[in-house]
Image (cartoon, coloured by chain):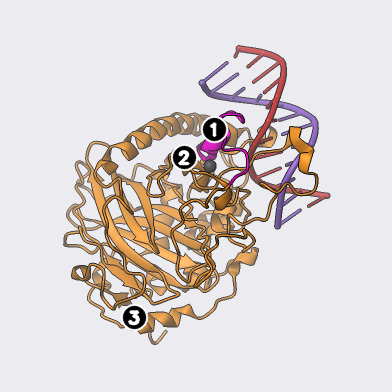
Chain colours: A orange, B red, C purple
DNA sequence: AGGTACGTCACT
DNA sequence: AGTGACGTACCT
């Protein structure tokens, strides 16, 4: 605690990549991590609009019909979400109506190991996951207090600290994951900056103007939280090429190709989700689609999470067969083989400015970092924050307010992966629940 | 045992 | 095509 402020790592935007000669400096190669940079305001938006419309209708329906707890799992979520969003406990409402504990890394994802799947059209930098559920403020109440005080932006600036100190945060923390009791000091709980003024080890500052189109008044904060299951390549050295048995999300040693037991079981073999497509990377159930609503009897995954591959007919795209050929392109998460939890949060500042915060945490080591916009500036360049290996490297990359669609989109790169989020500009009682699986 | 979700079918 | 239901594979 004494070093709350001293443990802050912060780089200024000019660093643009090689502040300390860290191992994993990010080369902002356009087209690599952010191939959609240019049209990121187009495709994602379309996606957003489509889903938004859909969600609205669902939400409207539920607003009128459902009353207390349309989603019985809410309590569970609230409990699970607590470490990140304390008020969730208070309100007993999840940030979004869904029932997915997996999103917090406590559930197992049944997916094909990456190397057995031939990815098709999925760019890892694709932007997806626009989740919006029309709800009331109750659902939003968790935002501001839960994540970061609006003042934090001001307070976090200009706190030069050596990367070494960031390493202090690397001390192992009991995997809250076990489940059950995610009490404070786990995951984000140990992130002092999220509740008050000081900041966690890493701080990125990305800035932008919040073109608040309308709503001159101050809006409440919105946030989109994401959990990333960072399946990494056995840090240092052996990449995860061969065995899927390393305990990361994609590595549930299942019988993907090897068919456990009976080789010719044929017939009823269930295909498994690819784990890499956009829907697969989405970890949070929307809670409002037909599958979510009908989960009890339908036994179907959320429509927004339905694997693209599984949507295809079993026969098509010889993908289903075995043959790995070569593992899907994977970005090395150097020295980072843990699940990573991250959340975006935006808070309106004075005068149309919007602060975007990215908080990131590994569940096991407790490594935490936060990236956020500051109140004046220019975003463009990302800066990097970090701690050294096996730390995280976070770069702010892009923040783009979209006037027409009233959303803000933020993209950052984290340990080689891009994270993207879309947040509603106005409070409107909408709670984005986006997520991206980084694996 | 219990949860998740794939495959499939019936109904609309 | 969308939805709801069921059986059940595959997990923990
Ligand atoms: Zn859904
Ligand atoms: Zn998939």
Q: Is residue A87 left or right of residue A245?
A: left
Which of label 3 and label 2 is nearer to you? 2
- In this rendering, the answer to whether A286 lies above or below A438 is above
Q: Are marks 2 and 1 on the same chain?
A: yes
Per the model, the C-alpha gap separating discs 2 and 1 is 9 Å
Q: Which residue position holds label 2?
A: A120
| Residue under pointer 1 | A317
Q: Are marks 3 and 2 on the same chain?
A: yes
Q: Secondary structure at mark 2?
A: loop
What is the secondary structure assignment of the residue under circle 1? loop
Q: Which circle's residue, 3 or 1, is located before the other in the chain?
A: 3
Q: Residue at x 33, y 84 (%)?
A: A6
| Residue hosting label 3 | A163
Give percent across and percent down for residue C2. 53, 23
Q: Label 3: chain?
A: A
Return the chain for callout 2. A
Asked if the stretch drawn in magenta spans residue A371, the answer is: no
Q: Decide whether the magenta segment is chiefly helix, strand or loop.
A: loop
Q: Residue at x 49, y 34 (%)?
A: A63
Q: Is residue A431 positioned above or below A313 on the image?
A: below
Dot 3 crowding, Cα within 10 Å, few <14, some 14–19, many 20+: many
Q: Chain of mark 1?
A: A
Magenta stretch: give its range: A304-323
State which quarter of the image contains the N terminus of chain A. bottom left
């Amino acid at each position: 605690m004494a070093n709350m402020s001293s443990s802050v790592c912060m780089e200024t935007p000019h660093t643009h990549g090689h502040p300390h000669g860290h191992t994993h400096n990010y080369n902002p190669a356009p087209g690599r991590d952010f191939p959609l940079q240019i049209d990121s305001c187009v495709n994602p938006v379309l996606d957003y609009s489509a889903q938004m419309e859909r969600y609205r209708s669902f939400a409207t329906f539920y607003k009128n019909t459902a009353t207390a707890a349309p989603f019985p799992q809410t309590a569970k979520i609230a409990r699970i979400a607590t470490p990140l969003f304390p008020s969730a406990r208070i309100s007993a409402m999840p940030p979004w109506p869904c029932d997915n504990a997996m999103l917090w890394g406590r559930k197992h994802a049944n997916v094909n190991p990456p190397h057995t799947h031939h990815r098709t059209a999925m760019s890892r930098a694709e932007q997806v996951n626009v989740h919006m559920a029309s709800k009331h403020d109750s659902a939003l109440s968790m935002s501001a207090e839960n994540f970061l005080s609006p003042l934090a932006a001001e307070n976090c600036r200009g706190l030069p600290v050596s990367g070494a100190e960031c390493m202090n945060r690397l001390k192992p923390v009991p995997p809250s994951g076990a489940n059950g009791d995610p009490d404070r000091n786990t995951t984000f709980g140990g992130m002092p900056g999220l509740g008050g003024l000081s900041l966690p080890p890493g701080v990125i500052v990305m800035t932008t103007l919040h073109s608040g189109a309308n709503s001159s008044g101050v809006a409440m904060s919105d946030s989109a939280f994401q959990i990333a299951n960072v399946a990494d390549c056995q840090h240092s050295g052996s990449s995860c090429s061969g065995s899927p048995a390393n305990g990361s999300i994609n590595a549930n040693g299942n019988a993907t190709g090897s068919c456990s037991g009976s080789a010719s079981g044929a017939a009823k073999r269930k295909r498994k989700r690819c784990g890499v497509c956009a829907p697969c990377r989405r970890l949070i159930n929307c809670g409002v689609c037909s599958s979510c609503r009908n989960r009890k009897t339908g036994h179907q995954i959320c429509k927004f999470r339905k694997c693209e591959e599984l949507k295809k007919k079993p026969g098509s795209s010889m993908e289903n067969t075995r043959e790995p050929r070569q593992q899907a392109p994977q970005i090395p998460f150097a020295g980072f083989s843990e699940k990573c939890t991250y959340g975006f949060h935006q808070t309106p500042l004075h005068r149309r400015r919007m602060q975007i915060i990215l908080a990131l945490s590994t569940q096991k080591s407790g490594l935490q970092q936060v990236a956020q916009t500051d109140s004046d500036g220019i975003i463009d360049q990302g800066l990097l924050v970090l701690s050294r290996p096996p730390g995280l490297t976070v770069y702010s990359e892009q923040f783009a307010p979209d006037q027409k669609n009233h959303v803000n989109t933020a993209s950052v790169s984290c340990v080689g992966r891009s994270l993207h989020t879309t947040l509603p500009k106005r409070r409107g009682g909408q709670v984005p629940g986006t997520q991206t699986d980084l694996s």
